[in-house]
Image (tube, rainbow, N blue to C red):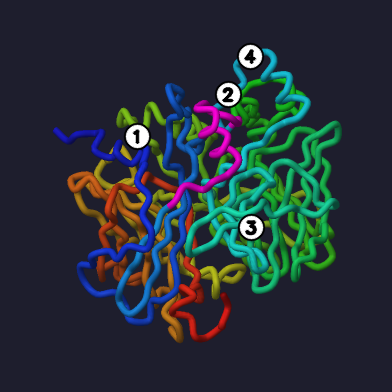
Amino acid sequence: VTDTTLHALGFSSLDQEVEDVQLPVDGALPDWLTGMLIRTGPARFEIGAQSYTHWFDGLAMLHAFAFAGGEVRYSNRFLHSRSWQEAHRSGRIARGEFMTDPCRTLFGRARAIFAPRLTDNASVNVAMLGNDLVAMTETTMPIRFDPFTLEAGRHRPLSEAVRGQITTAHPHVDGERSYSYVIDVGLRCAYRLFVEDRGRQRVLASLPVDEPSYMHSFGMSERYLVLTEFPLRVSPYRLAFSGKPFITNYRWQPERGTRLTVVDKETGGVVARAAAPACFSFHHVNAFEADGAVHVDLLAYPDAGVIDRLRLEPLRAGAPPGPLPRLLRFRVPLDGFDEHAIEPTALCEVSFELPSIDASRRGGRSYSRVWGVGLFDRASFIDSVVKIELTDGESRVRRWHEPGCYPGEPVYVPRPGGEAEDDGVLLSVVLDSAARSSFLLVLDADSLAERARATAPHHIPFGFHGRHFPRLTRPAHDETTGEP
Ligand SMILES: [Fe+2]
């Protein structure tokens, strides 16, 4: 009989913070691997006697792995957001999170309505926006931080024109430019897509909506942005006045179907719309133009039930989070006809989450390699790294798996000068339940053969996303840019 709660350590709080410690390495890191992998994720699930409800709720911690000369140095630190500071000062959960609401008293509820104190607990993703390294959640208050000390700085504000309360933690960064959207919830709700170019933000399109959809990411091809609305919708009145935790205000309305809106990145014009059967997704994988259509690939669940399955209580008890989503392709014709009814096609048999592609070279273009995490051994939590080769007709799958080990998002790092789409390595933080600690796993991105593992001094609670920044180097070692 297998213990179905071996992974539960990944949902327990971590107190220890370390600064720039060298990790013992088994195997050999590629000599070309430089820069830093920086990740965010929840690391404190209780404040005093109160507990957060959902995996997405815990207070964020940053983890940084710095690579140089075949060595790995590691730092971790709680993100000193306002949510974190207030919780520490008061000894109570201070701000409403995804599925946790601290406003128990009538007074607290009234205050929340008239001066909503949105969370800035940036536990979802990190990004380089302009010259700012930020941690993000789904409110419009990303937090700048120092990559070397992991010290939090000020919020990075949006311009007046881009106002909104809800956003995505998955912006698309394209060189100097980045693209994202906000959701403005008010008497009249709107999705506002915007571009930031050399520090200047400009609204591309403002799309009115009666009941906004819960969306975690969006698609981007070379010429277009694609907003995919799933039928998990919220009444703005309920969101403002219910006094209930954020996501519990949303209602599953499958009759609304899934709606895709394609917006031109230059003009902001809506060039196509399509309606598809109801589904739910967190992650778009890629989008590209081919054969007179925009192909939109995303990881789809049949409905939004996964949100409830990712509550801490069932996850810790060993209830499976699955079934995981499948990779579907939606083809939205670009023929000027406004509203197409379309059916997606499944690109492969295997189901997986936390997708990764060669974004720097294949993002927005046709591609054939996807990595992610999967459920292998009828596990009660994600227990394998998967690679899918998308080819016409048939897909090929490879898998990395080790008993008692639970890997996180595999971040793809291309080998400099490499040509092939899988000529590089994957970086994944893995919980080793037997050792009661985590390690950074370095896999060959093509074969999924292990190249090295670097063991951290403690367990690293399961996080969501991170990014590899090839040019981030500690100032003491930095002879190229001269930057402080
Ligand atoms: Fe995500």
- The residue lying toward the viewer, choosing from 345 and 384, is 384
* Quarter of the image where the N terminus is located: top left
Q: Is residue 423 left or right of residue 246?
A: left
Whole-percent x, y for residue 206 in the image:
83, 50
Mark 2 lies on residue: 102
Q: CA distance from mark 1 to mark 2?
A: 28 Å
With respect to residue 14, does 453 lie above or below? below
Specify the amino acid type for callout 4. Thr
Mark 4 lies on residue: 105
With respect to residue 25, does 236 lie above or below? above
Which mark is first along the chain, 1 or 3? 3
Q: CA distance from mark 3 to mark 1?
A: 30 Å
Mark 3 lies on residue: 171
- The residue lying toward the viewer, choosing from 46 and 255, is 46
Mark 1 lies on residue: 320
Helix, strand or loop under label 1: loop
Query: Can residue 326 be seen in the rendering of this structure?
Result: no
* Quarter of the image where the C terminus is located: bottom right
User: Of the residues tagged 1 and 2, which is closer to the observer?
Assistant: 2
Specify the amino acid type for callout 1. Pro
Assess whether mark 4 and mark 1 are in contact (beta carbons under 8 angstroms): no
Whole-percent x, y for residue 377 in the image:
24, 44
Whole-percent x, y for residue 6 in the image:
24, 38
Q: CA distance from mark 1 to mark 4?
A: 35 Å
